[in-house]
Amino acid sequence: MKKNYSRRRFFKTGTIIGAGLTLIPPVLKGGIGSKAGNPVRLGGPVPGQFTDPAEWVKVVKSLGYSAAYCPVQPGASGELIRSFRTEAKRSNILIAEVGAWSNTLDPNESARKEAVEKNIAALQLADEIGASCCVNISGARGEIWDGPYAGNYSKETFDMIVETVRHIIDQVKPVSSFYSLEPMPYMLPDSPDSCLDLIKAVGRKQFAVHLDPVNMISSPQKYFNNAAFLKECFTKLGPYIKSIHAKDIILLPELTVHLEERRPGLGYLDYALFLQEASKLKDMPFMLEHLETQKDYKLAADYVREMGKKAGILFAE
């Protein structure tokens, strides 16, 4: 994988809280007096590029992860893909997702077709390597592929998303993996209800939800009531969730409303509840992202494990 661990853009990390935590290895053990649910599969980016699955497993395990982003790219040989799938299963590592980051709604028709083909190839890889899902955002109706545009919310755009998702899934016909759209604050889907609207409209069994609650917290009301919002996400979307992005968020005292992404532990998100809800789902990858260095990822993982320990959450080894 590239040294730039952010897939879209890099977010600054803060130093408000979270420093000084010690590494707590993932263990199948709950907190005192707590009833743990299913083990949560903590994961994140793994530095380096790998052609040897055993070496990849070694690095994943050294980070204390039981889930990981896909270690190969579309176009890899069938033999290499099968070797990673076999080794991941043998080593109890869940390949959480294959990213297909591109604008399938690009106003330039040639660029749009290229993006759709990229998504088809990514979903094919996800199915072959045994990943939980292939994930993209729906796209944007403008030059910036993940940008805010009024057209992102038009009826025409909704219909284009439905048509595009159907086309991608129908071209691949995945057996075990799912195609998913990560929610965003200024494009569809942007809420649990809009996720459900798309699922109903697409009407494909292999269309699922990639949950990123931070991306949907776009108001002070949701920010301060994020525990209730997290519960809403899991209550409405639980059966459809295939992977989760674990981030944090902070509301800054700047006009107008100014919300920024942060490393887990440096924001306001109710992580104990977040983990409790995630543990209700079986074999669920809980994926760290958007951090600059592996030191930041370690601090994030430390915080997640510490919050999990306090809440009686199990982490898969």
Image (cartoon, helix red, strand yellow):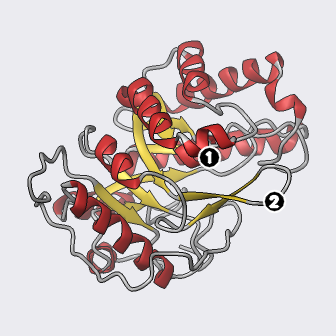
Looking at the image, residue 124 lies above or below residue 296: above
Label 2 and label 1: CA atoms lie apart by 19 Å
Residue 223 has which mark?
none
Q: Amino acid at mark 2?
A: Glu
Query: How many residues crowd around disc 1 within 10 Å: few (fewer than 14), some, or many (20 or more)?
Result: many
Q: Is residue 93 visible?
A: no
Query: How many residues crowd around disc 2 within 10 Å: few (fewer than 14), some, or many (20 or more)?
Result: few
Specify whether 39 is left or right of 222: left
Specify whether 308 is left or right of 303: left
**What residue does disc 1 label?**
215
* Towards the viewer: 228 or 145: 228
Q: Amino acid at mark 1?
A: Asn
Residue plotted at (45% across, 76% down): 18
- Callout 1: SS: helix
Estimate the x, y position of residue 193 in percent, counting from the top left: 57, 22
* Towards the viewer: 67 or 286: 286
Specify whether 142 is left or right of 85: right
Specify whether 151 is left or right of 89: right
Disc with the residue nearer the chain's start (2 vs 1): 1
Estimate the x, y position of residue 44 in percent, counting from the top left: 43, 66
Estimate the x, y position of residue 133 in percent, counting from the top left: 44, 43
Q: Is residue 249 visible?
A: yes
- Callout 2: SS: loop
Looking at the image, residue 70 lies above or below residue 101: below
**What residue does disc 2 label?**
254
Instruction: Answer with the quarter of the image where residue 2 lies.
Output: bottom right
Estimate the x, y position of residue 54 in percent, counting from the top left: 26, 76
